Image: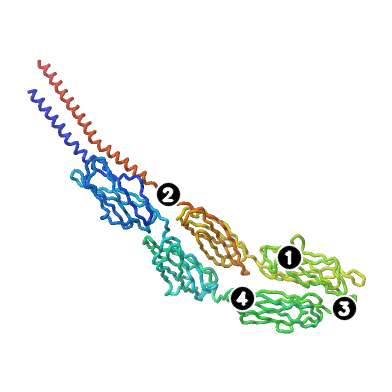
Amino acid sequence: MRSNRGVRVYQGILALIIIIIIAMPVLATETYSPRIEIVNKDMPEVEAGQTITIPIDIKNISTYFLKNIEVTPTLEEDSPFIGDSLLLNQTIESIKMRDNHLLEFVLQVDKNAKEGIYPIVFNIKYKASQTVYDETALVYVKVTTDQLPAEIIVDSLTYDVSTPISGEEFDINLSLKNTGTLKAENVLVVLSSNNNFIVTDNQSEQYILSIPGMVKSNVQYSITPKEELESGLYPINGTVTYIDNYKESKTKEFELFIPVEGEGFTGKVNLAVENMSQLGQVNVNEEFTVDFDVVNMGEGKASDLQIVAEPESDKIIPVSLNKKILDTLEAGEKTTLSYSFRAIDGVETKNYPIKLTFTYTENKEEMSFSQYVGINVQGKSASSTSTVPLVIVSDYSSDPTIVNAGEEFNLDLTLWNTNSEKAVQNMKVTLQIKENSEDTQDDVFTPVDGSNTLYVPYLEPGAKTSQQLRFYTVPDAKARNYKIEVNFEYEYEQADEITKGTSTDQIGIQVVQPAEIQVVNFNTDSAPQFAGDKGYVYITCNNIGNVKVKNLQAIIKGDLGEETIFVGDLDSGQSHEFKFKLRPDQVGTMNETITVSYKDTRGEVHESTEEFTLDIMEPMPEPDFDMYEDMGNMEGMEEEQGSKTPWIVGGVALGALIIVILLIIRRRRKKKELMFDEAI
């Protein structure tokens, strides 16, 4: 009885062991499958437009025998690689456990491909143990190119008039530049009407079939500034749309600034007096004539021109009409004017100024300026010893003729003792500004290395002496013609006694405010450092003068090409920042210059140039993807080691089960033996 029971126990244990052994492969199969891995170590590299052979090393990292392995690369629509996936399919008959097989795939790279790292998905299909498996693997290919993508910019703006005028149509020419090396196609330029300008309807869109790399192309528009515009700088906006070499549509907005003169503007007027008649000494009751030419040296028309010649003494009287009126004086036109006067009884021997006042209309704005001409008059001569000598300024000049505020100048005076019989001695000559207007500055002219006083020890009868003074004009002096009073104090002999005498004369000095642009904040911190990169160079201009400047612009020239930015007018105290975009396409030291230019109130052009260099380096290397592939191989090794785990766990579990069963049997035997002993 006991024997049969033991046999049944052992049979149960044996059946349990068999079940565990059978179940272990099934458990292992659920956690482990056949697997293929691509074990390429180096990333293939190819230049755009070339053909590449991609090696694919396929390894069976499982313990299965693999058959009918099909490898097919998948090429997406946006892939730079050209080829038919069906034709690129390759088949391997079989790969043994832990074995590998090398395949090669030949692909063409699009010539317009962007530089970068591109993935290729390989689909792998194979059979193991009558089961079909599908896997995918990624292979990265680096594509390089020395081409720059197409990029269209507005390079410059010109127009067919010197100055656009509100209400008057004019043509503008936009120069477009492809800063890339690859062609841009289907270029559409749209210039939009806005609150400032009206674009001719049938010309608002201009089409260019294509613009090759590094080439310029022009489009032209007819636009009209609106009539209500005042003089100033006004924006007009537009867009450029094109298809780049990657067949992508690009749209860029641009804004242009155009200087406009207000309604009725015909250009600036610049009147000048030339060929002034040189009169000698004028006697009492003698008629004399002042002749001169008036020339319009500007670009605009002067309308309603009036020239009034007015003596500043009642001892000089006009004997002809002292007001001349001209309807217009066109640009470049010249006219001759003549005025007649007479010195009447009671006139003194001195220099008498005659004020010429010019009033005219310039672009609907009334303008005026004054100029003086001096007449030397000889009073009645006296033969007696009671004659009082008179000293006057017979001639004067300044160097420069027109004085800049904030600068020094020389004033040359010729002093004349008009008395033919008596000398003067210990003569003191003092100069001071003499104006009646409230805004006159008393300290406009400051003496340099001296004073505003001259001393002449002795001047013979009828003699002349030349004297020179140097003055400094204060920076904030207003632009105008300043009258300077010349006062004489001297001694002369009268009836064997020394008598004091005085006289007064006047001269005029023309002062203008110089224009001055200060170039500051020249900044290359954002400039490009690598070939193909885009960066910027900034330069700021401050108008530190007291007058507005015209035609302000900046031009960058050098190894990276040329670009012009036009600003136009810049008021006193205002600033403007120029921003130049640079995109180098080569490596090395690039020599560049930025030139800032503008016109002052006289029409003279001033320039300031900054030179700089940029050191352009090769582009930074792309990230190394080999590290990630090695990590993938390590993961495969871990999976390979992990595939043994179910067998180890199963063995440990089986051993533990056997030990438990043996302990149970042993315990039961011991219990039965104790029961048997008690029974005895």
Label 1 environment density (alpha carbons within 10 Å; few <14, some 14–19, many ≥20): some
The answer for how far apart the CA atoms under marks 4 and 2 are is 68 Å
Disc 2/disc 3 C-alpha distance (Å)? 103 Å
Left or right of 120: which side holds 649? Answer: left
Residue designated by label 4: 366
Q: CA distance from mark 1 to mark 2?
A: 67 Å
Return the x and y of residue 312 as percentages of the image width and height. 74, 76
Which residue is labeled 3 in the image?
382
Rendering coords of residue 242 (x, y %): 40, 65
Q: Quadrant of residue 209?
A: bottom left
Q: Earlier in the sequence, mark 3 or mark 1?
A: 3
Observer-nearest residue: 486 or 404?
404
Tell me: 12 left or right of 362: left
Alpha carbon of mark 4 to alpha carbon of mark 1: how far? 33 Å
Q: Which structural element holds mark 1?
A: strand
Quadrant in which the C terminus is drawn:
top left
The amino acid at mark 1 is Asn
Residue type at the position of mark 3: Ala
Residue that label 2 marks: 621
Find numbered disc 3 in the image and state the secondary structure of the residue it sits on: loop
Q: Can you tell which mark lies on residue 461?
A: none
- Disc 2 crowd, CA 10 A, few/some/many (<14, 14-19, 20+): few
